[in-house]
Amino acid sequence: MNKKPLYPLDLPSAQRPLTANKITVEYTQQADCMIDDENCQKIEISTEEYDDNMFFIMKTERWAFDSLDELILLIEDFKKRI
């Protein structure tokens, strides 16, 4: 007897494929020497889909870097994750 697989309503199936509409990655680093704050710095990079277009969003209060290559590596890492 072949049983038909059961798909709960909240899980994807062949008829209801899973789609990621938003992906968010938060990166952290220690505070730089330009500020007197011992907290780490955070930057959030995410994607959002709107009208079949994907947009990239960066949010941070402060993310210091002394080389453009550091920022490029950060974006390249995010690109691998989406």
Image (cartoon, helix red, strand yellow):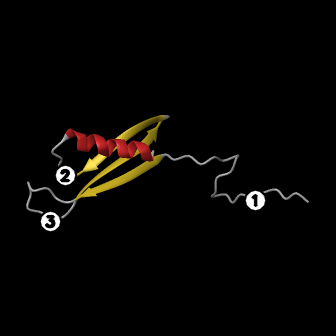
Side of 37 relative to 51 (left or right)? left
Q: Nearer the viewer, mark 3 or mark 2?
A: 3
Mark 1, residues whose alpha carbon is within 10 Å: few (<14), some, or many (≥20)? few
Residue 51, image x and y in percent? Answer: 48, 35
Name the residue that disc number 1 marks.
6
Question: Which of the image's four quarters has the N terminus?
Answer: bottom right
Specify which label sits upstream in the sequence, 2 or 1.
1
Specify which label sits upstream in the sequence, 3 or 1.
1
Q: Residue furthest bottom?
A: 38
Residue 30, image x and y in percent? Answer: 20, 60
Residue in the picture at 37% in, 52% down: 25
Residue in the picture at 28% in, 49% down: 59
Residue in the picture at 70% in, 46% down: 15
Name the residue that disc number 3 marks.
38
Q: Nearer the viewer, mark 3 or mark 1?
A: 3
From the viewer's side, name the closer residue of 50 and 72. Answer: 72
Disc 3 is placed on an element classified as loop
Side of 73 relative to 33 (left or right)? right
Q: Amino acid at mark 1?
A: Leu
Mark 2, residues whose alpha carbon is within 10 Å: few (<14), some, or many (≥20)? few
Side of 18 relative to 55 (left or right)? right
Specify which label sits upstream in the sequence, 3 or 2.
3
Query: What is the CA distance from the residue labelled 3 to the residue labelled 1?
Result: 52 Å
